[in-house]
Each structure stands twice: as structure tokens, then as C-alpha cells.
Image (cartoon, rainbow, N blue to C red):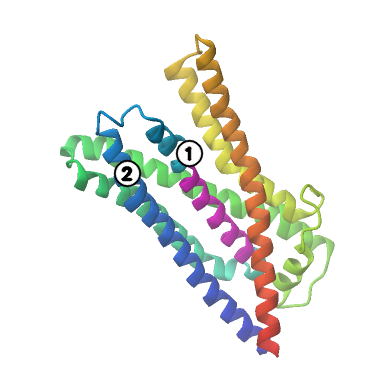
Amino acid sequence: MNNALFDELCIKRAKKNFLTFVIACVAILAFFYMPTYILLSSNVLWRNSIILFLLTELIEPLIDFSFYWGSFAFLIYIYLRFGKKHIKHFVILYGVATVARYFLALFVGYLMMSFPNAKTFWGEEVPSALFSFLMDGLQMVGVLLLAEFSCRRPMLREKSYPKNSEGEGMVADCFPIEGLFHFQKPIVKLCFFAALIPAGLKLLSRLYYDIFFIGLPTEVGEWILVATYYIGDVATLIIGYFVLLYVLQVFYTKEVQKKIEFES
């Protein structure tokens, strides 16, 4: 009974924390980044400035990837700890947050500039936002499939856990993370591939755009700039990997601390 009550408290706390996290991500994108970008890009004095460049090439990707890394950490931990029964609430929150990220940002942009005509709105803006939402949804599904087939199932095959405490036992076996590159451990491998999903899509989309729309660079400066972009994409994989490892470790440590307090 105590374990069931503690699990219920953990789920409620996780829902509250995840809700707070996604609201913060949506608010930063819609009410900080979008207005700042529009103000700078619409001003001739700032249009070619280093500030606008950093905003689009550093701040925006940081906001996007932070959303993915944080969301994936919540989804992975809840799925491993509580299984399919409780993950649906977090999937719904993720979906709502994804819709809000794209459509609220569009709406704020329209308020500051002007609303497009119906043809542009329904023919270009809405399909683009829906495509982005679909891709984010596929990323989420990919992470959950990775959690199932690269971590949960292998661990269940290797060890028999007590009934109704499989998740608690698996999470306890996953942590603490002793080696940053100990890929024999399922949770480490899972974090790497979960970080690879958004980084890989970013890299592929950039490659597609460069091949079919930009073409090969013709000057040394252009080659250096292109190389910097691709190095940055690879860096998001490495950073995301470490972020996921750290956040998941924090989740486990916090739960252990809360359980000690709960039982005392």
C-alpha cells in the first residue's frame, strides 16, 4: 500500500513538473524568441547583424533542443519506471505542447506583423506547422520504441523482477550511471540514440536543403561557415547525450530522496 501511494505521489509530481517544463518552453519560444526575431529581422539596421545571426543559429536551436531533451527525459523515465499505463498522460502533454509551440508562435507573429491571406494561411502556414507537429510526434514515438526495445525488454529478459515492482527494479538497475560511455548498459545506449533522433533529423534536413537549394560552397569562407553548421549539428548529439544522462540521473536521485523522506 505504501509503495502504491508513493508511486501515485511520484506520478503526480512528475506531471506537475512536466507541465511546468513544457509551458516554460512554449512561453520562451512564443513570447521571447518570436517577438525578438520579428523586431530585429524587420529592422534594416539589425537585419544583417551578428545578434540576429546568433538568435537564429544559436538561441532558436537551443530552445528547440532543450524542449526535446527535457521531454524525452521525462518520457523515458516515466515509461521505464511506470510502464505503458501512465505514459499516456505525458504523451498527451507532449502533443499539446508541440501544437502550442508551432501555432502559438505563428499567432504571435501574426499579431506583430499582419495576418496572411486565407490562401497563404491554409496553403502554406498550416501544412508547414502540421508537418512539424507530425515530425515531433514521430520523434516521441521513436524514443518510446527505443525505451521499449533497447532497455525495458532486454532488462526484463535478463532478470525476473517482483510482480508490480518491475519498473522500480529496472530503474534501480539502470542507476547510478557509472560510465559516461559505458554502452553495454541499456540506459546509456538509450540516451545516446534518443539524443541522436533530433540531432540526426536536423543534420539530414540541413543536408537536404544544402544539396537541393543552396549547392556547394564556392569560397573558403563559405566552406568554413558550412563546416561550422555541421559541427554544430554533431555537437547537439553530444550535448543532448550528456543532458539526458544527467537529467535521468537527477530524476532517479530525487525519487530516492523522496522515498527516504516518505518512509521516515
Three-letter code for the amino acid on which mark 2 is drawn: Thr
Q: Earlier in the sequence, mark 1 or mark 2?
A: 2
Q: Residue at x 67, y 50 (%)?
A: 242
Give above or below for 129 relative to 221.
below
- Residue 105 point in image, percent of width and height: 32, 48
- Residue 76 part of the magenta-drawn span: yes
Q: Which residue is mark 2?
A: 36
Magenta part, dominant SS: helix
In terms of secondary structure, where does tag 2 sit? Answer: helix
Residue 91 or residue 13, whichever sits in front: 13
Residue 184 is situated, as x and y percent measured from the top left of the image, at 82, 50
Question: Outermost residue, front direction?
Answer: 45
- Count the numbered circles shown: 2
Q: Which residue is mark 1?
A: 58
Work out whether 236 lies above or below 28: above
Callout 1, which amino acid?
Answer: Leu
Q: Residue at x 72, y 76 (%)?
A: 165
Closer to the camera, 145 or 235?
235
Q: Is residue 146 left or right of residue 71?
A: right
Segment tinted magenta in the rendering: 61-79
Q: Residues within 10 Å of mark 1 (few under 14, many from 20)?
A: few
**Which quadrant of the rendered structure holds the C terminus?**
bottom right
Question: Horizontal and vertical percent for residue 198?
Answer: 55, 42
Q: Is residue 186 left or right of residue 92?
A: right
Residue 134 % position (x, y): 43, 45
Query: Which label is found at residue 29?
Result: none
* Image quarter (top left, top right, bottom left or bottom right) of the N terminus: bottom right
Q: CA distance from mark 1 to mark 2?
A: 14 Å
Residue at horizontal 81 percent and vertical 57 percent from the top: 178
Name the one closer to the observer, 111 or 85.
111
